[in-house]
Amino acid sequence: MMANSAWLKYKPIPLLWERHYPLLFGFGISVLTLCFAPELGAFFTQKKWVFANIYTSIFTLESTLTAFLLTFYGVIVTAPTGFLRRIQGTPSFKAYLNYVRVALVSGFWAAVISVPFMIVAPELSQSGDGSTIAISLWLGLSVFVLAAFFRILSAFFLLLDGEVPDAQRGEE
């Protein structure tokens, strides 16, 4: 919805890509992790890296981003002045709020799901076992959330650069 708005002067990415790239990145990471789990596990062991630290890092990052985004969402929804008032009600603003909601909900669930992973600390092993499947799905969700946050950030700058015609504001 963002990239095809009449008031948007340029299209950095096509609309279909904008809508779905977080999902594609998340799915891609899940598949790659599942396919290359033994190699990734061996790589971490060889380098003497602790795979379990990823759980804590992702939890911390996504919790912080989700809290920040929730605050930001509160500001853009309740601020009735200036720029935000001009774009409220436009298709682009509605799509942007939807992107924010998707990132908030998925960020919350990614953080919640990270807690058991931090406690149990499963390792990557064989491609078909339960812990590797769970890790793959969790990594996919985590990458989806990070891509969704990036989408919000980049879309916000597009909103700031655009000029909203009177007809899109509902003032016909």
Image (tube, rainbow, N blue to C red):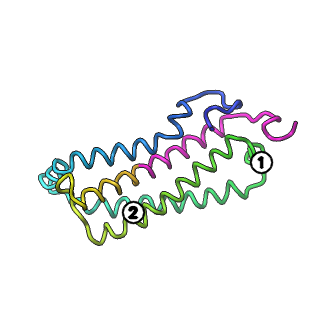
- What segment is highlighted magenta in the picture? 144-172
Disc 2 crowd rating (10 Å Cα; few below 14, some 14-19, many 20+) is: many
Residue 10: image x %, image y %? 61, 27
Secondary element type, mark 2: helix
Residue 67 inside the magenta-drawn segment: no
Displayed quadrant of residue 80: bottom right
Secondary element type, mark 1: helix
How far apart marks 1 and 2 lie (CA) works out to 35 Å
Disc 1 crowd rating (10 Å Cα; few below 14, some 14-19, many 20+) is: some
Residue 98: image x %, image y %? 61, 50
Give the residue drawn at x 66%, y 39%.
160
Q: Is residue 16 left or right of residue 35?
A: right
Residue 155 inside the magenta-drawn segment: yes
Residue 50: image x %, image y %? 21, 60
The answer to whether the residue labelled 1 contacts the one labelled 2, judged by CB atoms less than 8 Å apart, is: no
Who is closer to the viewer here, 158 or 167? 167
Q: Residue furthest bottom?
A: 119
Q: Residue furthest right?
A: 172
Above/below status of 67 relative to 152: below
Above/below status of 62 relative to 39: below
Give the residue drawn at x 58%, y 52%.
100
**Which badge, 1 or 2, is on the more N-terminal residue?**
2
**Label disc, if present, on residue 59 of the rendered structure:** 2
* Picture mark count: 2
Image quarter hosting the N terminus: top right
Q: Is residue 166 left or right of residue 35?
A: right
**Label disc, if present, on residue 85 of the rendered structure:** 1
Residue 24: image x %, image y %? 42, 41
